[in-house]
Image: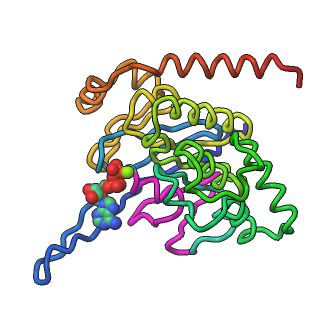
Amino acid sequence: MTVAVTTYALETRGICRDYALNSGLFAAQRVLRAVKDVSFRLEKGKTLAIVGESGCGKSTLARILSLIDAPTSGELHIDGARIDIAAEGLTREMRRKVQIVFQNPYGSLNPRQRIGDALMEPLLLNTALSGSERRERAMNMLRKVGLGPEHFNRYPHMFSGGQRQRVAIARALMLSPGLLVLDEPVSALDLSVQAQVLNLLADLQDEFGLTYVFISHDLSVVRYIADEVMVMYYGEVVEAGTRDAVFGNPRHDYTKKLFAATPRADVDSIRERVERRRKARAAQPA
Ligand SMILES: Nc1ncnc2c1ncn2[C@@H]1O[C@H](COP(=O)(O)OP(=O)(O)O)[C@@H](O)[C@H]1O
Ligand SMILES: [Mg+2]
């Protein structure tokens, strides 16, 4: 008899991250454990939402999942393979597996670099593609995120916030990663623009079969985008499950409080719009 083994797009086992706190020249060094014993599994093509209030360790975990920072302890597996950047460094192959999008796209866009160059740069650094191939891929990606060739030679400051986030998403996708970590990607945008960027992310996920880790403090956004939900509180996972299980029956006191404090507006209209678009697309001949 053979046993089917599921390979997860992402799996963590007991991830911890400590920060050393310098409390003065002669004071004993103290340690803040910003992420404590976080374990989860995420299937390919799904979205895990990580929620929790400011300071609970979401961005610390995001940096570990996107291979920017190494955990103090614990294991990270991507597509079934253990990745240990502290021991092995970061290879090109690893770099291509996972990318991150930040709340503020200025964090990932150089103000002096034209958008086209920003999109082509990951290809220049990580592939052997020719200049014309790089250009063609960047142009294609601009179109995928709802921008056009006219944007290729512009600088980041010439875009609106929503457009800049589209550029950051495009750049993150240039190396065709399977996994995208999105750290509060729409939190700085107006509500109407949030809906557009969330729709774009849903479309891209379908088209490329992407797996998302979507970090947010906004439950209305999470309710719309998540398959699985993980609630963090002071560095620990206090609740985890499918979206419907967590939203339908929050168990932990903190989760109940979090939910009680969040308005439920807007989500249903966003979700309806996405459903309409999905149906329209499915109805189109291939
Ligand atoms: N580089 C760092 N050095 C020391 N402490 C940090 C550092 N980065 C984050 N922290 C602390 O770790 C905790 C978690 O921060 P963070 O991961 O940014 O939370 P969140 O993204 O949920 O707001 C906070 O108490 C924060 O002050
Ligand atoms: Mg954060």
Q: Residue at x 46, y 26 (%)?
A: 223
Q: Is residue 261 above or below residue 116?
A: above
Q: How is the image coloured?
A: rainbow
Q: Quadrant of residue 33?
A: bottom left
Q: Residue at x 42, y 54 (%)?
A: 61
Q: Is residue 182 above or below residue 27?
A: above
Residue 191 rendering spot, x and y as whole percentages: 46, 30
Q: Is residue 36 visible?
A: no
| Residue reaching furthest to the left | 26
Q: Is 62 inside the magenta-drawn segment? A: yes
Residue 51 rendering spot, x and y as whole percentages: 38, 39
Which quadrant, please, contains the C terminus? top right
Residue 262 rendering spot, x and y as whole percentages: 31, 26
Observer-nearest of 43 and 55: 55
Q: Is residue 237 visible?
A: yes
- Count all numbered tags in the image, as a single digit: 0
Q: Is residue 13 above or below residue 2?
A: below
Q: Quadrant of residue 1?
A: top right
Q: Is 7 inside the magenta-drawn segment? A: no
Q: Residue at x 18, y 75 (%)?
A: 29
Q: Which residues are magenta?
A: 59-88
Q: Is residue 190 above or below residue 39?
A: above
| Residue reaching furthest to the bottom | 26
Observer-nearest of 218 and 68: 218
Q: Is residue 262 left or right of residue 180?
A: left
Residue 266 rendering spot, x and y as whole percentages: 45, 21
Q: Residue at x 15, y 73 (%)?
A: 23
